[in-house]
Amino acid sequence: MVDRNTTLGDHSEISRKLLHDVESFIDEIGTRSCTAHLQAVMRDGKFLKGKQLGQKPERFVEDALIVPVLETLGHSVLARPVQYAPRWTHGRGIPDFSLTTIPTATAKEHDIRLFVEAKPPNKLHYARDEVKEYLKKDLGFGAIAVLTDGIQWELWVRPQNEPLTDDYKPERTASLRPAITDAKTRNLEKESYHPHHTRNKIDADEFNEFTVPAVCSLVQEKFGIAADIEES
């Protein structure tokens, strides 16, 4: 392994923390001897396989990458929230996570829902389909949804009583693809890894739009709810 320590520079704190999340994910991939498998996922659009990981891909990516990134962005989450939304009470109608950054009771009081739909890499299109289906089930609340496969990140907003349009575009997007592609060389003895260079490939401006202050500002802008409601 070469050059393990991150070079300090005039980069944002969020880039530094996200790089740590990416490196931890890559290290876990290496521990499971899945670096070549990840390379096929990143380069060829393949899907992560449980047989390779020794664990279901969905749970692995949630634990090893998605939840750490959400926490870096300042959020807290609740996995598989039951009866979080009126008509999401059975089977696949339960979101993967609710964002408890804004307390659940406060969200319900103000008729908004904040949730995360998570998928393994290269399956983000399934998250899009499921979120569209969720948001068709009840227009009686406003919704903010984070959609991610760990690599690509999207933030969707659906105001109360306003169905999504067929050509809906995410409110915000961000990507860890360049950083993950570079960081996987941590596990390859014949290649050098340069943390400073990799950190420059994380767009701090994009990810700042997913942080707690940005989401609370969006809640205030779109739903007219005070931005300090993340205080529990």
Image (tube, helix red, strand yellow):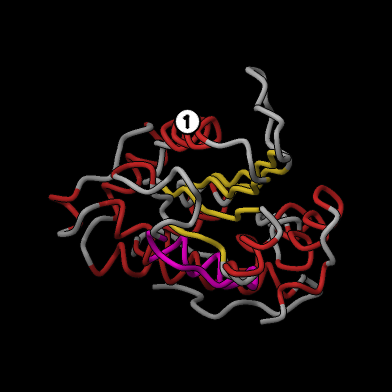
Q: Position of residue 153 (x, y in %)?
A: 58, 47
Q: Position of residue 31 (x, y in %)?
A: 25, 69
Asked whether, in this view, residue 215 is left or right of residue 34, the answer is: right
**Type of the residue with mark 1:** Glu
**Tag 1's secondary structure?**
helix
- Check if residue 131 falls in the magenta segment: no
Q: Please tell me which residue is depicted at 41% across the width and 60% down the height of the picture.
A: 81
Residue 131 vertical position relative to residue 116 in the rendered view, above or below: above
- Magenta part of the chain: 64-81
Q: Quadrant of the N terminus?
A: bottom left
Q: Please tell me which residue is depicted at 67% across the width and 43% down the height of the picture.
A: 173
Q: Please tell me which residue is depicted at 59% across the width and 67% down the height of the picture.
A: 18
Name, please, the residue furthest toward the top.
Answer: 166
Residue of label 1: 133
Q: Which residue is at the front of the view, 129 or 138?
A: 138
Q: Quadrant of the C terminus?
A: bottom right
